[in-house]
Each structure stands twice: as structure tokens, then as C-alpha cells.
Amino acid sequence: MAKDEPQPWKIPPIVQELAGGVQDEPPSRYVVREQDRPAAAAAAAMPEPIPIIDLSRLSAAGGAGADELVKLRSTLQDWGLFLAVGHGMEPEFLAKMMQLTRGFFNLPLEEKQKYSNLVNGKDFRLEGYGNDIVLSEDQTLDWCDRLYLIVEPESRVVPGLWPSRPDAFAGALREYTARCRRDIAGVVLAVLARLLGLREDRFAGMMGDGDAMTHARFNYYPRCPRPELVVGLKSHSDASVITVVLVDDAVGGLQVQKPNAGDGVWYDVPIVPNALLVNVGDVIEIMSNGIFKSPVHRAVANAESDRVSLAMFYTLDPEKEIEPLPELVDEKRPRRYGKTTTKDYIAVLFETFARGARAMDTVKIPAAESDSGLQASVK
Ligand SMILES: O=C(O)CCC(=O)C(=O)O
Ligand SMILES: [Fe+2]
């Protein structure tokens, strides 16, 4: 095929449009391999206690703060994620964000296509509305559409890509971006540093450096008559420093594996009203030299309802080197990860994600010591 001839498989359909016409089995491009299918009975309920952390208690003086810190440490080691409450964002505001997300995806297709992530209808770019990049003809496609926007720093915002409808969308996203950074990301990064025995601003400081960007990803998972044959978003871990996710308050679908268990069991993340999910990303796993693990997760589709979520990915300057922090490497805890940069790592992530592999495996140095040695060193 000539180089500039169109390759139709590179241009995936909008799943929401496609789903409307699917009565039974989804098209074969969406049907996942037998071993990756979310068979209805396979996901287990998360064992008690569900990791819920009250952020307002973390800074409390005395016993309450110390107890919450202990709980956070064990949650991070067991799961690499937690549900954050006490963040100060009002339930009405979170409900509004969910409503605006639904409002955008419910707009007519022509309106949404104004923000298409395919330039000239064919060349993929990260930002905009559409699907993830398709890199090969036999790639299994996810049962999901998404709107991807860079929301910080201001100099990187492309205003033309921000939806003008629903009316309140852009204003609410700006407010959500500011509050999410101040009330969640900032607080969590300071505590993560503390738990590792580092200065409080060790991670938070990097987030204000150069072109450190925050990416917002609005996900829309249409209803699927045979949800057991597809995945909403295939198994992955996030390339971020940390991720904050506002999940649908009515429809579940997020599943996670226990990072150190290695048993491949999927657990359903429960819906906790007004709680935001915070997960460790690959950058913290690398910088913490594996003390904190970036959990593998996925989203499954649902037979009865569509579902939305909004993920905020906090990343570092694209050129910044990412490697284990020297303070966290010593003889007892040899270096577990090679060196990369945000820019290179994200490029690898797209390629590995498309073929269902993990970007993390490209930087891992095979372990010579047991994980328990690493965990004992968490402060
Ligand atoms: O939809 C969800 O609950 C998870 C979304 C997610 O993992 C992502 O956007 O990276
Ligand atoms: Fe994710």
C-alpha cells in the first residue's frame, strides 16, 4: 500500500455510535482474548477494610493524624491506591462534574467531532475527542470513547479543544483542575514524600517544574449487550506520578489487581459516594525504587448502563529524567529501575498499551532481593 493511502483500520469508530447498533455480539475488533475476558464471576469484592483515607485527618495533630498515616501506608503497600474522602470538594460540585461529563458525551456527534483527536480526519494526536491510538490492524479495541485535554500549565492549554458545550464545562473544569491539585494531588504528594522519609516538597516541587503537565481524560463507556466479551479500558498502569479519578457514582466498572500478590485476581473497586480514587503512577513506582507500586487496573463495560469517569494524570516535565531517587537506593535496596524521561516513557506507554503489554516492564531491572526488604524501609 502506498505510504499516503488511507489505512481505514487506523481510524476506529466512535464506540458510542457503534454501540447503538449492536444488539448482541460486538464486532470482532472489540472481542478480547479468552484469558482477558471479564467473565462475570471472575472479579472478587475487595476484602475489608476498603482503603478509604480521610485527607483532612492526615494533617491533624496527634493520634488521629498518626492513625490515618499508618492506614495510608498500609493501603499504599497493599493496593497502590485508596479512596480519598475529607478532600473538601462538595458533593454538589462532584455531581456537577459528572453531569457535565455526561452532558458532553450526550451531545450530537457533529458537535463532539469539532474536538476530534484525528487531525484532518486521520492523523492521531493525544488531545481531543475520539479513541486511543490504533497502531496495528489486529489491535483489540477498547469499548470506550474519551476526551483528552491538557489542563495545566496554562501555557499548554489549547483553548480551541475545550468544549464550548455544555456551557458550564470549561469553567467547571478549570475549577476542578485547581481544586484537585490543591486539595488532593498536593496533599497526597507531600504525604508520600513523608512516608518515604523525604522532604515534603520532594515530589510536589517537581510538579511545578518547567512544563510539568496535568492531563484530564474523560472516559465514556457505552452500554454493551455482551460486556463479558469486551473491556472498557484494557489492563494498564498509569504513566503518571499519581492519578486522581472521579468515578461514576452509580455504575461500577473499575477493577484492580493487588500489586504484590502476582496472582492476577481482579477486584472490583467499590463506589463510595463523594470519594475520589487516588492511585500511585509508574513515576512514583520508579522514583520510590519500587517501595510504592503502580497498580494494574482496567475498566469493564456494563450490560445495563453506560458509565463515565474523569481521570487527572499528574506528570513531570517531558524532558525530566525519571529514575530511582538516590536517597532510596543503597546496598540493601539496589536499584530496581533504569532511567527514562516522561516524554520517552509516555511514547513507550502508547506502544505497549496498544498491544496489551506494560510500559513498566521496559524499565524494570530484575530483582535480586525480596520485596519484603524494600517494604521494611518505608518510614
Ligand atoms: O474508568 C475508570 O474507572 C478508570 C479510568 C482509567 O483507568 C484511566 O483513564 O486511566
Ligand atoms: Fe488508568
Image: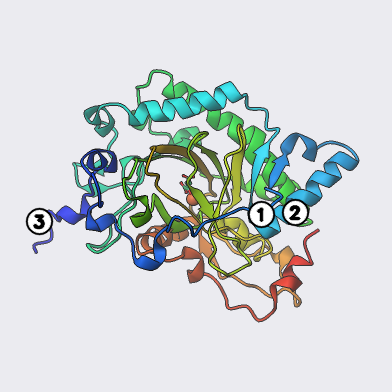
Residue extending farthest to the front is: 41
Q: Does ligand 1 reach within 8 Å of label 3's beta carbon?
A: no
Could you tell me which secondary element the residue under label 2 belongs to? helix
Cβ–Cβ under 8 Å for marks 2 and 3: no
Image quarter for residue 180? top right
Instruction: Check the image and report above or below for 379 versus 333.
Output: above
Q: Which residue is mark 1?
A: 47
Camera-near label (2 vs 3) is 2
Q: Give the residue type that dot 1 points to.
A: Pro
Q: What percent of the width, then of the height, locates residue 87? A: 67, 32
Q: Earlier in the sequence, mark 2 or mark 3?
A: 3
Residue extending farthest to the right is: 62
For residue 242, side relative to residue 187 (left or right): left
Q: Which residue is mark 3?
A: 5
Instruction: Check the image and report above or below for 263 versus 70.
Output: below
Label 2 crowd (10 A; few <14 / some 14-19 / many >=20): some
Could you tell me which secondary element the residue under label 1 belongs to? loop
- The residue lying at 68 percent from left, 46 percent from top is 189
Q: Earlier in the sequence, mark 1 or mark 3?
A: 3
Q: Give the residue type that dot 3 points to.
A: Glu
Camera-near label (1 vs 3) is 1
Cβ–Cβ under 8 Å for marks 1 and 2: no
Q: Earlier in the sequence, mark 1 or mark 2?
A: 1
Instruction: Kindly identify which numbered label has been placed on residue 73.
Output: 2
| CA distance for labels 1 and 2 | 17 Å
Camera-near label (1 vs 2) is 1
Could you tell me which secondary element the residue under label 3 belongs to? loop
- The residue lying at 59 percent from left, 43 percent from top is 277
- The residue lying at 46 percent from left, 64 percent from top is 359
Whether residue 216 is visible, yes or no, is yes
For residue 181, side relative to residue 247 (left or right): right
